[in-house]
Image (cartoon, grey):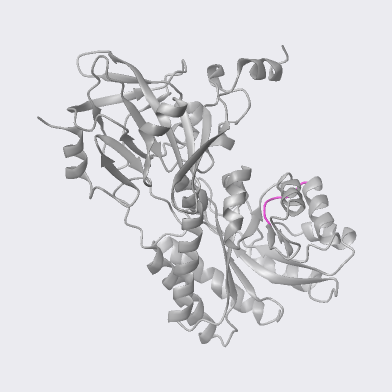
Amino acid sequence: MNKYIDLIKQTFDFPTKEFHVEEDQLLFNGVNLMDIIHTYGTPLKLTYLPKISESIQNAKKYFGKAIEDHDYHGKYTYCYCTKSSHFSFVLDEALKNDIHIETSSTFDIPLVRSLYKMGKISKETYIVCNGFKRELYKEYIAGLLNDGFVNCIPVLDNLSEIDYYLEHVKVPFQVGIRIAADEEPKFGFYTSRLGVRYKDIIELYETKIKDNPQVSLKMLHFFINSGIRDTAYYWSELTRFIQKYVDLKAICPELDTMDIGGGWPIKTNVFFDYDYQYMADQIIKNIKWMCAKNNTTEPHIFTEFGSYTVGESGAVLYSILDQKLQNDKELWYMIDGSFITQLPDSWGLNQKYIMLAVNNWKEEYHNISLGGLTCDSMDYYNSEAHQYNIYLPKKNEGKPLYIGFFHTGAYQESLGGYGGIQHCLIPAPKHVLINRDEEGNITHELFAEEQKSENMLKTLGF
C-alpha cells in the first residue's frame, strides 16, 4: 500500500527542521497542529512568533560571521520592512531583537509614532523612509525629524523630493538616495520606476546637498525585485551599485552607509537549498574588495528584510469539506476557504507554498486539485513548486482530513484586504498566535475571530 508518509519521505529529505510527524499527525516547529485545530477549528491562520526572532538572529549571525571572517570594518544593521506585515504582534516580536524599521508609505509613520509611544522604539531607532512620497508622507517625515527622531532617514526617490524637507525641516538632518536599478531581463521594462537615475545622483548631491549645512547625505540605497540571489544579474547590479558608492564617497565624505535592499528568500518548498552564509560572505567580500581597490573606507551595511523576517512564521490550515470527481481523471478536494482571498499571492502571482497534510499520513494517497469556496474559476491550487501534481491522503467517510499551507506569513493579509470586503464575501479566517514560554512550553491565544457578517454589512453601508 502506498502511504502518504512514504511518498513524502521518498520525495523529500524528511523530516526537516520545521516539520516532522508523530502519531500520524504533522508538527510545525514542534507545534501539534491537530491540537490547534481541535481548539479553534478551521479555516485558521496562525503565526508562530518564535520563528520571527529566530530568523532575525540568524541573519545577524550570518553577517556578523562574514564581517569577522573578512576583517570588514563597517557595522551591520538589520531593518524590518513593515509592509510585509504591519500587525502589532509581528512588530512586538521583531523589536525584541534590537532591530530598526523601514517604511514605505504614509501611514507607516503613525505606526512609528505608536511604537515610540509604547516604548517599543526610541528616537535613536533608524527609520528608513522609502517609496515615492505624496505630500502627507513627506509632512509626516518632516514631523519626525523636527521632533528629534535623529535617525529618521528619508530616502530620496526623485530629484525634487529634498526640496520639501529643506523647506519644512527646522533641524539638521540626513538623507539617503535610492538608485534606480535595472530590472531583470524578463521584466516588461528596463529600469525601475523607483529611485534616481545613476547619471543624476552626483548632480543631485552637488546641487542640493553638498553646500547646504542643514542636510547631509548618509546612505546610498540599492533595491532589486529579485531579492538577494546567487545569479549573474544580481552580482552585476550589486557591483555597479558599489562602484557608484565609491564614486560618490570620493566627493561626499559624510556618506558612510550602504543599504542593500531586496530581501533573502524564504522556504517555499521542502527542497530549499539557499545558502544564507555564502551570500552574506559574498556581499561583504565584494564590497570590501571594491572599496580596497579604490582606497575607499568600507561602509556600514543595512539590510531590509521583510518576507525573510515574518514569512516562515505563518501558516493557513483548512478542512477538506468534500471531494468531487468532475470527469474520468480530475478529482477535486474542496477546502473551507479561498485561495483568492486568503492566499492572494498563490492566485495573483502563482506563488507556491509548502503544502502538506496535517493528519492521515498513513492513508493511501492520490492526485487531486484543490478548489476554493468562491465562484471564480481561478480559485484553485493544483501544482507544487517541485512538480506539477498535488498528492494528498485519500479522504475516507467519517475521517476528517486537514491540510496546511506553510510559510505564508508575509503580505497575504494586506493583499487580501484584511478586515474588509473580499470576493464572494468570504470572511477572513480566525487568527491564532502561538508562542513558547520561558520553560519552552507551547502557548496559544486567539488574536482575531472569524470575520462577522455584521462587520461586512457595515462596511458595505447596510
* In the displayed structure image, the side of residue 224 where residue 121 appears, left or right: right
* Whether residue 171 is visible: yes
Magenta residues?
A: 129-134
- The quarter of the picture where the N terminus appears is top left
Q: Is residue 131 magenta?
A: yes
**Observer-nearest residue: 251 or 424?**
424
Q: Position of residue 311 (x, y in %)?
A: 48, 47
Up/down of 99 relative to 253, above or below:
above
- Which of the 4 image quarters holds residue 11? top left
- Which of the 4 image quarters holds residue 321? top left
Q: Position of residue 39 (x, y in %)?
A: 44, 28
* In the displayed structure image, the side of residue 283 where residue 92 appears, left or right: right
Q: Residue furthest front?
A: 439
Residue at horizontal 64%, vertical 18%? 456
Residue at horizontal 53%, vertical 58%? 182
**Observer-nearest residue: 235 or 321?**
321
**Is the stretch drawn in magenta largely helix, strand or loop?**
loop
* Whether residue 86 is visible: no
Residue at horizontal 60%, vertical 31%? 418
- Which of the 4 image quarters holds residue 130? bottom right
* In the displayed structure image, the side of residue 116 where residue 412 appears, left or right: left
Q: Residue furthest left?
A: 1
Q: Is residue 17 magenta?
A: no
Q: Position of residue 210 (x, y in %)?
A: 79, 75
Up/down of 52 relative to 212, above or below:
above
- The quarter of the picture where the C terminus appears is top right
Up/down of 391 relative to 146, above or below:
above
Up/down of 254 relative to 235, above or below:
below
